[in-house]
Image (cartoon, grey):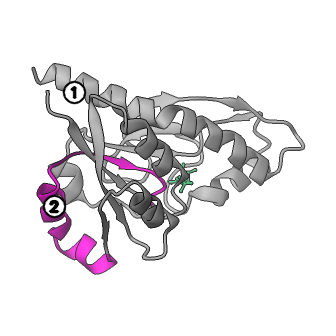
């Protein structure tokens, strides 16, 4: 069976992207065929280079006012999208073009601590301020709203009262790395089975 080609969308350092790239180097199911970023100095672009995976830079105007990205995804035969620290809202035309084929990872236990402005350290600061005793990543399908699609997977870690936002971030990120690649693969396998 043909491997599904994955595009990773990322805005930042790309530690999740690196884990996904590593994981799918040995997968029979899928491969990473493109890395898309909205930031020209994003670390994830260098990581993609080290894996010899092509990259594509988007700008706000083309992403929200045209559908050019669909042509780019088509040119790379992309069948699945993983948002790994991608901080822009996915426009409706893109959600529609990839129904049930876009997964996002969010660094909190949704539906808590989600929505616009809730990303990266803002999430962990809010979790700390609320005195939560646990946190963890949520992996969910993407719809037109920030952090609202169906949840596929959550993992939890316990928090100590003395944990600072950076400690919480470290605990959650390590769970992201442990689970996101295999959940992407599991969702793709499920879809392949359904389509046969
Ligand atoms: C990750 O913690 C991810 O969950 C978060 O950004 C970080 C990216 O780290 N995503 C969001 O906050 C989305 N709302 P990375 O660039 O090292 O993978």
Work out whether residue 102 can be spotted. Answer: yes
Q: Nearer the viewer, residue 66 or 177?
A: 177
The reply, left or right, for residue 159 in relation to residue 11 is right
Q: Position of residue 117 (x, y in %)?
A: 54, 63
In the image, is residue 72 above or below residue 188? below
Estimate how packed mark 1 is, as few (under 14), some (14 to 19) or many (20 or more) residues with alpha carbons within 10 Å: few
Residue visible at 52% across and 40% down in the picture = 111
- State yes or no: residue 68 in magenta: yes
Q: Position of residue 88 (x, y in %)?
A: 40, 64
Q: Nearer the viewer, residue 196 or 138?
A: 196
- State yes or no: residue 21 in magenta: no
Distance, label 1 to label 2, CA atoms, is 21 Å
- Residue furthest to the bottom in view is 61
Residue visible at 58% across and 42% down in the picture = 112
The quadrant in which the C terminus is found is top left
Q: Nearer the viewer, residue 45 or 66?
A: 45
Residue visible at 88% across and 40% down in the picture = 161
Residue visible at 34% across and 46% down in the picture = 142
* Magenta range: 59-86
Q: Which mark is residue 70?
A: 2
Q: Position of residue 190 (x, y in %)?
A: 26, 23
The reply, left or right, for residue 8 in relation to residue 153 is left
In the image, is residue 22 above or below residue 41? above
Q: Which residue is mark 1?
A: 191
In the image, is residue 180 above or below residue 88? above
The quadrant in which the N terminus is found is top left
Asked which secondary structure carries label 2, the reply is: helix
Of labels 1 and 2, earlier in sequence is: 2
Q: Quadrant of residue 74?
A: bottom left
């Amino acid at each position: 069976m043909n491997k599904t080609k994955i595009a990773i969308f990322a805005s930042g350092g790309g530690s999740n992207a690196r884990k996904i790239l590593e994981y799918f180097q040995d997968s029979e199911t899928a491969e990473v065929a493109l890395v898309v970023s909205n930031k020209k100095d994003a670390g994830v672009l260098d990581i993609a280079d080290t894996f010899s995976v092509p990259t594509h830079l988007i700008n706000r105007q083309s992403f929200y006012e045209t559908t050019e990205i669909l042509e780019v995804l088509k040119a790379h035969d992309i069948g699945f999208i993983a948002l790994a620290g991608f901080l822009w809202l996915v426009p409706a035309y893109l959600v529609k073009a990839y129904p049930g084929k876009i997964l996002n990872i969010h660094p909190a236990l949704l539906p808590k601590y989600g929505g616009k402005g809730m990303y990266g350290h803002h999430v962990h600061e809010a979790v700390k301020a609320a005195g939560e005793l646990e946190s963890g990543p949520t992996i969910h399908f993407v719809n037109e709203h920030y952090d609202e699609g169906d949840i596929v997977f959550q993992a939890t870690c316990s928090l100590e009262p003395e944990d600072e936002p950076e400690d919480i971030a470290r605990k959650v990120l390590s769970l992201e790395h442990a689970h996101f690649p295999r959940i992407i693969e599991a969702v793709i396998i499920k879809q392949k089975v359904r389509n046969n």
